[in-house]
């Protein structure tokens, strides 16, 4: 349910469980974290794209596993920190709605593209549990504390246009152009010096 394609220094990771709105099981989280961790030690990796299949990027935790405690698993934090630690350019190509704990992996990416129909919500207060610590910090760094509270405390659902104006996403892209645009962002990094690219990322932090 997790696809990985390696091509000329680009890793494209795809969540492929559209029949369940790309909701994530513990095994899927483990696999995603292991892929990101492996990328950190691969000298050939120049760029990393994270996307999904279908009309939803990810609905967050699988419902059955959420009831068994997956929503508070350390795997979420492990995954987002592994993506944030990658020295290469990371792009979240959001093919649809982003919800719940799946926010973490997108927030950990350097750039976020989204289709016009995407919606963004993280209703932890409504569901009665805490977000992952790094999710709240990364979100606040992008959109400020007040808007972060609108999403996390007030459980507001944000449309793509508003997410763009806030800075939660960086560009809205037509569905048929999403992967082309995401890959286009990686052209310069794929041809560049990885040490220079990593140093630039550090300067931007």
Image: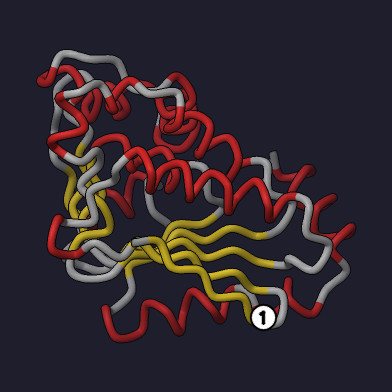
Query: Residue 133: x and y, percent?
Result: 45, 19
**Colouring chosen for the image of the structure:** secondary structure
**Toward which corner of the image does residue 90 lie, by quadrant?**
bottom right
**Relative to 175, does residue 29 appear above or below in the rendering?**
above
Query: Residue 188: x and y, percent?
Result: 72, 77
Q: Is residue 29 left or right of residue 119?
A: right
Image quarter in which the C terminus is found: top right
The residue at 51%/57% (across/down) is 111
Few, some or many C-alpha atoms within 10 Å of disc 1 (few <14, some 14-19, many ≥20)? few
* Number of numbered discs visible in the structure rendering: 1
The residue at 57%/47% (across/down) is 34
The residue at 29%/67% (across/down) is 95
**Toward which corner of the image does residue 131 lie, by quadrant?**
top left
In the rendered image, which residue does mark 1 sit on? 187
Image quarter in which the N terminus is found: bottom left
Query: Residue 63: x and y, percent?
Result: 13, 37
Determine the secondary structure under disc 1: helix
Q: Between 106 and 58, which is closer to the camera in this rendering?
A: 58
**Relative to 155, does residue 26 appear above or below in the rendering?**
below
Q: Is residue 12 left or right of residue 136?
A: right
The residue at 52%/42% (across/down) is 108
Query: Residue 182: x and y, percent?
Result: 49, 74
**Toward which corner of the image does residue 94 lie, by quadrant?**
bottom left
Q: Is residue 99 left or right of residue 35?
A: left
**Relative to 186, does residue 118 appear above or below in the rendering?**
above
Q: Between 138 and 79, which is closer to the camera in this rendering?
A: 79
Q: Is residue 140 left or right of residue 204?
A: left
């Amino acid at each position: 349910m997790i696809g990985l394609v390696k091509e000329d220094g680009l890793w494209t990771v795809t969540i492929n469980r559209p029949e369940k709105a790309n909701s994530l099981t513990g095994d899927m989280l483990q696999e995603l974290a292991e892929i990101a961790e492996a990328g950190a030690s691969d000298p050939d990796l120049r760029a990393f794209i994270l996307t999904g299949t279908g009309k939803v990027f990810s609905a967050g935790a699988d419902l059955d596993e959420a009831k068994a405690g997956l929503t508070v698993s350390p795997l979420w934090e492990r995954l987002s920190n592994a993506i944030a630690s990658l020295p290469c350019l990371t792009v979240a190509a959001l093919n649809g709605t982003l919800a719940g704990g799946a926010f973490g992996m997108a927030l950990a990416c350097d750039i976020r593209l989204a289709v016009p129909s995407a919606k963004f919500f993280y209703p932890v207060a409504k569901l009665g549990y805490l977000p992952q610590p790094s999710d709240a910090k990364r979100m606040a760094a992008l959109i400020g504390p007040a808007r972060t509270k609108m999403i996390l405390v007030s459980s507001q659902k944000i449309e793509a246009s508003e997410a763009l104006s806030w800075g939660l996403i960086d560009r809205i892209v037509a569905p048929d152009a999403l992967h082309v645009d995401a890959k286009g962002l990686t052209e310069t990094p794929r041809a560049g010096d990885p040490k220079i690219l990593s140093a630039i990322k550090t300067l931007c932090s």
